[in-house]
Amino acid sequence: MWLDATLAYLHYIAIFMLFAFLTVQLVFIREPLDERLVRRLGRIDIAYFVTAIAVLVTGFLRATLGAKGADFYFNSWPIYVKLGLFLAVGIISVKPTLTFIRWRRFFEKDAAWKEPGDEQASIRRLIMIEVHLAALIPVFAVIMARGLGH
């Protein structure tokens, strides 16, 4: 029982951190870009990636070692919807990550470089899509936890 409670806590903390890092990215991407902000976005993106891995690992541990057991989760369709949404968020996050790296390199070559506003707006939209897709995952978690997906 303690293991189940501990895994649940770690999973929830990882989820809250994931949303926190996405929110910080959304706030920062609205600002005029300078080298300092682009470097900060890159560091936040790394933290977001690490947190996403923590969400995945703790979720898997909960499903396999938790009180309900692996059969409860893996014989239920909502877990596959959750994993699909998680994968979609991960795939969408690749473009912002690569863009943050590219922007950093531009600033390293030319400190006066200015990002065209349309690309910044496009990246902000992608991050917003990530947030909205990630926000759907708990809906299926609730369905799954209540045994409604069997």
Image: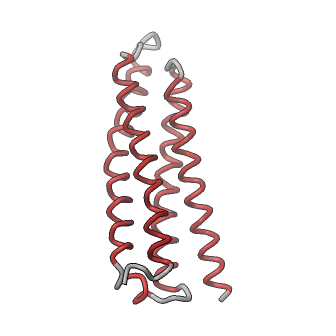
Q: Quadrant of residue 147?
A: bottom left
Image position of 89 with respect to 143: above or below: above
Q: Image height check: is 13 above or below 79? A: above
Q: Residue 124 appears in which quarter of the rendering?
A: top left
Tell me: 24 left or right of 81: right
Instruction: Tell me which residue sits at (41%, 13%) in the image.
Output: 113
Residue 85 located left or right of residue 15: left
Residue lying farthest to the top in this orientation? 112
The answer to whether residue 128 is above or below residue 16 is above
Residue 109, percent from left and from top = 39, 18
Residue 125 point in image, percent of width and height: 39, 34
- Quadrant housing the N terminus: bottom right
As rendered, which of 115 and 11 lies closer to the eye?
A: 11
- Along the line of sight, the residue nearer the viewer: 25 or 42: 25
Query: In the image, is residue 106 above or below residue 43?
Result: above
Scheme by which the image is coloured: secondary structure
Q: Residue furthest right?
A: 2
